[in-house]
Image: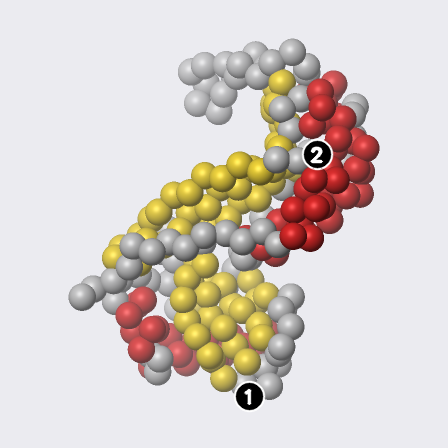
Amino acid sequence: MTDQQAIKLVEKEFKHKILGATEQYLEIHSPIYVNNQLKFDRIDRDKKDELIIAYLPVLDEKFYFAVYINTKTNEITGVGTEAYHQVYFRATSEALSVDDLKAMTHLTPTKFWNKGELRESGKSRHTFSNFIILPNPEPDEFEDKLKKLLAYLEQDKEGIRRLVENADGAIQVASTIHKGNGMIGGHNIDKDDIKRMNDLGLSINFDFYVSGNSFKE
């Protein structure tokens, strides 16, 4: 199945609301249209078992519509939402500069700032240096984002260990979840990823946010 074929299936579903879940979600939230066409942020082909996931941004929200497609039967098997997940490595220090932190690893930071630099607001200054690696910013499930981050960090295990030992280095997770029926669920970390984090000396911290409208009764 090509991306265009998947897009056509989703467009048909969102127009005719064949599945009850589609109607339920579209009663409370709207997708984004560009030139009268549905906007797609990603067609995820990482799954096995002939499953692909189409991610569509939700108007005025961070989370996504997630449409599950069976590529063997060419059918949509489910419609739901996927949280906006940020899963990244962060090292901070009140004593070290960003150059000091960069010198500990050959991995390139996605974002950084020095202690004493003005914040984006321009009204105050940062009280610590910050070094962030976020290799997977696109829509994805938490478990996949964590695995991709670990694979990236494992390219320089010694460097990451140095950042953990000499700065406040850890994995940070921030998830914005559709509150829907009030049950936001949780994240799963399998034993393989626990071992991989342990090998890198990494802890993991979570921040959860809920957003959006509740389902109509």
Q: Position of residue 108 (x, y in %)?
A: 73, 35
Residue 77 shown left or right of residue 147 in the figure = left
Q: Residue furthest left?
A: 217
What amino acid type should be assigned to the residue bearing mark 1?
A: Thr
Q: Position of residue 123 (x, y in %)?
A: 42, 16
Residue at left offset 74%, top offset 18% = 100
Q: Earlier in the sequence, mark 2 or mark 1?
A: 1
Say if mark 2 contacts mark 1, CB within 8 Å.
no
User: Closer to the camera: disc 2 or disc 1?
Assistant: 2
Dot 1: what SS?
A: loop
Dot 2: what SS?
A: loop
Q: Position of residue 53 (x, y in %)?
A: 54, 69
Task: Decide which of 32, 17 is in the foreground and name it.
Answer: 17
Residue 217 shown left or right of residue 146 in the figure = left
Residue at left offset 60%, top offset 86% = 72
Distance CA(mark 2)–CA(mark 1):
44 Å
- Badge 2 crowding class, 10 Å Cα cut-off, few under 14, some 14 to 19, many 20 or more, is some
Does residue 74 lie above or below 6 as drawn?
A: below
Does residue 52 lie above or below 29 as drawn?
A: below
Does residue 19 lie above or below 82 as drawn?
A: below
Q: Position of residue 75 (x, y in %)?
A: 49, 84
What amino acid type should be assigned to the residue bearing mark 2?
A: Gly
- Which residue is the site of mark 1? 73
Query: Which mark is on residue 201?
Result: 2
Query: Which mark is on residue 189?
Result: none
Residue at left offset 18%, top offset 66% = 217
Does residue 100 lie above or below 24 as drawn?
A: above
Q: Which color scheme did the rendering employ for the protein? A: secondary structure
Task: Decide which of 2, 53 is in the foreground and name it.
Answer: 53
